[in-house]
Image (spheres, rainbow, N blue to C red):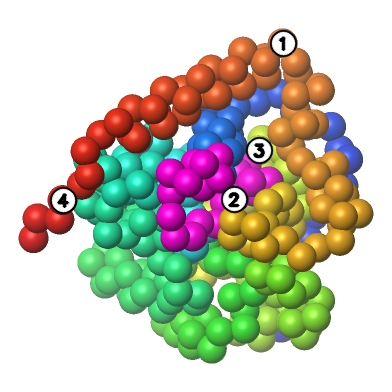
Amino acid sequence: MTTSMGTRRLPDTAPLSRLRDEDLSRLLLIRHFELTVQNLFAGGHLSGTTHTCLGQEYVPVALEPLLKDDDYVFSNHRGHGHYLARFDDPEGLLAEMTGRHGALCAGVGGSQHVRRARFHSTGVQGQSLPVAAGTALHLRRTGSDGLACVYIGDGTWGEGAVYEALNLAALWRLPVLVVVENNGIAQSTPTSRQMAGTIGGRAAAFGIPHLCVGSRDVNVIREQTAAAVATVRDAGTPAVLEFRTDRLGPHSKGDDTRPAPERAAAAARDWYLRYRDRYPEQFAPADEAQRHRMSVVAADVLARPLSRWEP
């Protein structure tokens, strides 16, 4: 019988619970970082491409306290929120994206390819899962209680490397936590038109437990997912956490092909607006603080000299 953690989802209209100040601040930092990035592109201060996580900020913020410093985190092309949930470092990330002094990787990684300590991101779809499986094998062989957490999107389930990695993770009982941010669209193609079956069904084919989370409430998410994360760590077995979320912005800078009503429906589910309206006395000063912080960060970073690669 296929193992299952079941599915327990709150409707998107469920009232959000009051957050700890530090959780709200981190959510707002990510939101204003991404908005700042969009504005810098629009103003010609950034080149290349970038993929914001607007609307999805709550996923890594909710999971971060369940992870340990010794855990590995593997991110993807839409990874700014994953990095900022782990490191309170908008300066280093923005310097990397602009190629300025203080850049995380001397400016050669840009928006998508970042490395710091046990955090790695890549723009190659599906690439992180095999690497995470290999890392998890190392953790198991060295007796560590660490795990490898890897973020992927719903579109990545079209990559063969995903299934090869899941097969090995299940066969070898590896501590791999697969976090799927299912925003319902793979670049410009609705998931319903590019993926047969379900993510849960595909995980079940390997005997891997799957939990689907529909809430956007950080407190609720932690309560729902804590046991699954602990099982990956303690039992050394893989699990798939699927988050039904929304991508509020375009795939990249300006390629949003979704109809206006669909974009409006996603915006109506945005945690940012719902929390603002429910807890205005807590939200307003925290929001202004992070808005101001990012304004200062952007001005500081853009005034720095260009970074230099020193091998």
Residue lying farthest to the left in this orientation = 311
Q: CA distance from mark 4 to mark 3?
A: 39 Å
**Which residue is disc 2 drawn over?**
53
Kind of element beneath mark 2: loop
Q: Quadrant of residue 157?
A: bottom right
Q: CA distance from mark 3 to mark 2?
A: 16 Å
Q: Is residue 216 magenta?
A: no
Labels 1 and 4 touching (C-beta < 8 A): no
Q: CA distance from mark 2 to mark 4?
A: 28 Å
Give the mark toward the camera: 2 or 4: 4
Residue at 76% over, 18% down: 279
| Sequence-earlier tag: 3 or 2 | 2
| Residue 197 spot, x, y in % from top left | 78, 82
Crowd band around label 3 with a 10 angstrom C-alpha radius: few (<14), some (14–19), many (20+):
many
Crowd band around label 1 with a 10 angstrom C-alpha radius: few (<14), some (14–19), many (20+):
few
Crowd band around label 2 with a 10 angstrom C-alpha radius: few (<14), some (14–19), many (20+):
many
Residue at 47% over, 28% down: 294
Q: Could you say which disc has been placed on residue 12 in the image?
A: none
Residue nearest the observer in this picture, 20 or 120: 120
Residue 51 falls left or right of residue 128: right
**Which residue is disc 1 drawn over?**
281
Residue at 68% over, 51% down: 249
Give the mark toward the camera: 4 or 3: 4
| Residue 239 spot, x, y in % from top left | 57, 67
* The N terminus - image quarter: bottom right
Magenta range is: 39-64
Q: Amino acid at mark 1?
A: Glu
Q: Amino acid at mark 4?
A: Arg
Q: Is residue 59 magenta?
A: yes
Q: Is residue 228 visible?
A: no
Kind of element beneath mark 1: helix
